[in-house]
Image (spheres, grey):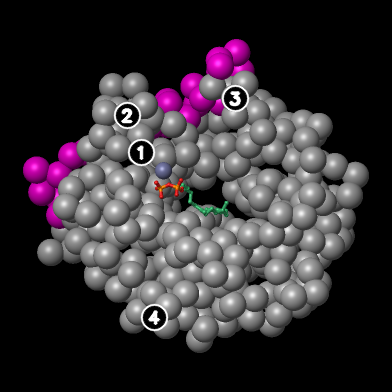
Amino acid sequence: MSAAKEFELPSMPTLCVDEHCAFVARASESADTLEHALTEHLRLSGIYWGVCAVYTLGRLDRTFDRAKKEEILSYVDSCRNENGSYGGGVGHDGHVLYTLSAVQIYALFDELSRIDVEAVVGFLSSMQLSNGSFQGDHWGEIDTRFTYCALSALRLLGRLDAVDVDKACAYINSCKNFDGGFGAEPGGESHAGQVFTCVGALAIGGRLDYVDGDLLGWWLAERQVKVGGLNGRPEKLPDVCYSWWVLSSLSVLGKTHWIDRAALARFILKCQDEKSGGISDRPDDEPDVYHTFFGIAGLALMGHPAVVEPIDPVFALPKSVLRRMGIELSGTG
Ligand code: GRG
Ligand code: ZN
């Protein structure tokens, strides 16, 4: 039975929509908590996760009133650096990761006009190296995550022409392993998170022919463990966020039916805090905005009826946002 049908069974736990929206709203207010201080360096990504979570639940306007939206957008504006990059927080070094988060937040709020496109494009293109790879910032770390971030942001801005896409995809191909998966660098161990970034980058670059769909599909399907959740690599514990990293990759390959979707949905729903809202990595752990978003996004890919805004598996943005931007959609299920 497909997960979509299973969601109608009385034995399937309910998705606590109101509670999760309240959880995200509280997280956006709690500037005085220790958690807030400890996550300062990735604030922009946190905002993207929270905003995208409530958007997919159809609750963007109900969760953030006009004043709150403006507060969030001004905060994002204030994370911009002179070279066009965005840092994870105010005054932080610019990084491709947070530059993508900023573009995603502006896209979600339909406020792309706040972006200095030429400056962002200038920064992102300056991060590409002669072998096609991307460094994340001026400190020089190279990772396939950064290729994804750069290509995704450039595509969202309609400026893929600013980088060498063929070389970027060939570099991603050089990070492919014997098991069909991808690592952070050539020879790096296959990891579901990196698989998402590499499959996503290849999809954006129009080079999915580099992927061995059957081999990678098997590797991804084997990430499902007995309790229904997915892990990121062999012998590891399941974790709700892999519901996204694995399932989005399977979706691009058209193979989400290669796992037991209903069992995965049950696992995600068991990780909810039904009283205070939020989703955790595993049942009975502390919820956080990151796992809340990726749990909901995983359910979206499985057609959960309460996740009213379907999400694109490559851009990790609601399809309606991409449609508004004139970007063609990815993923075949
Ligand atoms: C737009 C959705 C989106 C993402 C932007 C940052 C990024 C691009 C992608 C990150 C991909 C990635 C590497 C995800 C994995 C994150 C994770 C759970 C890492 C933990 O890895 P381990 O090895 O944990 O410490 P395990 O689960 O293996 O024990
Ligand atoms: Zn996780």
Ligand 2 quadrant in view:
top left
How far apart are the alpha carbons under marks 1 and 3?
18 Å
Mark closer to the chain start, 3 or 4:
3
Q: For the residue with label 2, is its CB less than 8 Å from the closest atom of ligand 2? A: no
Q: Is residue 11 magenta?
A: yes
Q: Which mark is residue 281?
A: 1
Please tell me how crowded label 4 is: few (under 14), some (14-19), or many (20+) other residues with Cα within 10 Å: some
Among the 4 quarters of the image, the one containing residue 167: bottom right
Q: Are marks 2 and 1 in contact (CB under 8 Å)?
A: yes
Residue occupied by mark 3: 38
Is label 1 within 8 A of ligand 2 (CB to nearest ligand atom)?
yes
Secondary structure at numbered mark 3: helix
Query: For the residue marked with disc 3, what is the amino acid?
Result: Leu
Of marks 1 and 3, which one's residue comes earlier in the chain?
A: 3
Highlighted range, magenta? 6-34
Element at label 2:
loop
Upstream in sequence: badge 2 or badge 4? 4
How far apart in space, not on screen, are marks 2 and 4 (Cα)?
34 Å
